[in-house]
Image: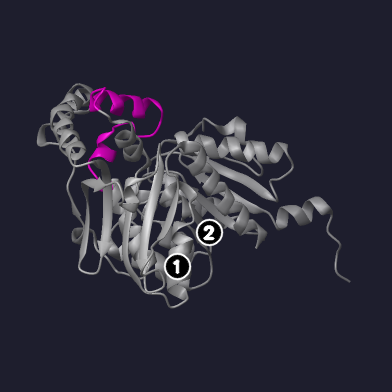
């Protein structure tokens, strides 16, 4: 005769056990959101089993999200990654999930490995599918095994239905003809605000204070982050686009690009004069400046453009991302997807929503 398990034992066996990697702005917002869901009785069997950054970690059977905002146990950089395998190896029934809230190459390089082990990966880290082509192909192959799921909605558009839409179109036989987008929430905000009344460098400092840019805003201004997002979108449509195939024209000059970290703030003023000239030239033609990413067969690039007011990408406000898709289905009038694309809270919400979706399955 089979044993009857107590409700709390059944719940724990079927729980989704989560390890959160990254305790920066997004990671901390994830913990706050998990705590809120737990308080409202909406956690749905989610168990926080571990939290780590590159230096410290904490593990337990069912951690309180708000009590582990600052992990305490020292970890080496390598161990903070290997630790995931060790922790999840002891799990029983139920889903095993890694939330990657880092921007780490080392962590992104493990995504395919975890998927192959049957560990779900939910990520805001663009270096997985927006990194080297071989890494994307490895992640894709690991997904195809069906052992685990990969949640990547937070990598582009902070959870907007971009990747889901592109994949659904492609799966339905639609052929994507081109993708154009304002893909950086921070740069969207900067050029929406930039009207000549304030130096561009002042706006960059404000965007950093608001949490829209990385702590070193050159990560945003270089265009590298937008290139990764364009790679992710193109690859979602089945295009094996390599990094070197995307031409990037950065906003940075050589001096700012190579400035030491402590000299970045002072060097930001080097942006002011050239961008004011670009602004005046755009206005003289009735155009707006936007940092745009574009892909079409045989051509892919990222750079600052002066867009006519009737261009679909000239619209949007604040941190909005705006993506325009032309396809065999949307040939005459393109499909346009728009919404907030920056901020720790919306990114964290996208990550947690994906975890909840996995748990419901």
* First in sequence: mark 1 vs mark 2: 2
In this orientation, which residue lies closer to the viewer: 319 or 265? 319
Residue 8 lies, in percent from the top left, at 79, 50
Give the side of residue 283 with respect to residue 170, left or right: left
Residue 299 lies, in percent from the top left, at 20, 64
Q: Residues within 10 Å of mark 2 (few under 14, many from 20)?
A: many
Give the side of residue 194 with respect to residue 324, left or right: left
Q: Residue at 10% x, 36% y: name it.
A: 254
Residue 221 on the magenta span: yes
Residue, far left: 254
Residue 188 lies, in percent from the top left, at 34, 40
In this orientation, which residue lies closer to the viewer: 157 or 356? 157
Q: Residue at 21% x, 37% y: name it.
A: 283
Residue extent of the magenta highlight: 196-224
The image shows residue 324, relative to residue 46, as above or below, that is below
Give the side of residue 308 with respect to residue 154, left or right: left
Question: Mark 1: which secondary structure?
Answer: helix
Q: CA distance from mark 1 to mark 2?
A: 19 Å
Q: Which residue is mark 1?
A: 167
Q: Which residue is mark 2?
A: 120
Question: Mark 2: which secondary structure?
Answer: strand
In this orientation, which residue lies closer to the viewer: 90 or 311? 311
Q: Is residue 113 in view?
A: yes
Q: Residue at 28% x, 31% y: name it.
A: 194
Q: Residues within 10 Å of mark 1 (few under 14, many from 20)?
A: some
């Amino acid at each position: 005769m089979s044993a009857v398990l107590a409700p709390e034992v059944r719940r724990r066996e079927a729980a989704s056990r989560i390890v959160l990697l990254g305790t920066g702005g997004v990671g901390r917002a994830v913990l706050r959101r998990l705590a809120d869901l737990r308080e409202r009785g909406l956690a749905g069997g989610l168990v926080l089993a571990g939290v780590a950054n590159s230096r410290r970690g904490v593990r337990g059977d069912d951690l309180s999200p708000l009590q582990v905002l600052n992990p305490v146990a020292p970890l080496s950089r390598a161990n903070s990654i290997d630790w995931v395998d060790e922790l999840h190896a002891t799990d029983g029934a139920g889903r095993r999930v890694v939330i990657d809230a880092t921007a780490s190459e080392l962590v992104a390089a493990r995504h395919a490995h975890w998927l192959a082990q049957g560990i779900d990966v939910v990520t805001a880290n663009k270096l997985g599918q927006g990194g080297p082509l071989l890494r994307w192909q490895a992640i894709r192959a690991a997904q195809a095994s069906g052992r685990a799921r990969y949640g990547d909605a937070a990598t582009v558009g902070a959870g907007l239905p971009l990747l889901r839409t592109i994949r659904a179109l492609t799966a339905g036989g639609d052929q994507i003809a081109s993708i154009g987008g304002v893909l950086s929430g921070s740069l969207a905000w900067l050029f929406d605000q930039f009207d000549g009344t304030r130096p561009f460098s002042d706006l960059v400092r404000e965007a950093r204070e608001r949490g829209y840019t990385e702590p070193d805003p050159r990560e945003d201004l270089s265009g590298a982050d937008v290139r990764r997002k364009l790679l992710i979108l193109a690859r979602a449509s089945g295009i094996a686009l390599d990094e070197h195939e995307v031409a990037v024209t950065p906003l940075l000059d050589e001096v700012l690009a190579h400035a030491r970290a402590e000299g970045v703030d002072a060097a930001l003023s080097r942006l002011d004069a050239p961008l004011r000239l670009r602004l005046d030239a755009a206005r003289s033609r009735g155009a707006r400046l936007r940092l745009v990413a574009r892909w079409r067969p045989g051509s892919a690039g990222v750079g600052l453009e002066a867009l006519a007011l009737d261009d679909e990408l000239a619209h949007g406000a604040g941190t909005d991302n705006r993506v325009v898709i032309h396809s065999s289905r949307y040939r005459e009038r393109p499909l346009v997807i728009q919404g907030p694309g920056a901020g720790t809270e919306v990114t964290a919400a996208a990550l947690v929503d994906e975890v909840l979706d996995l748990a419901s399955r």
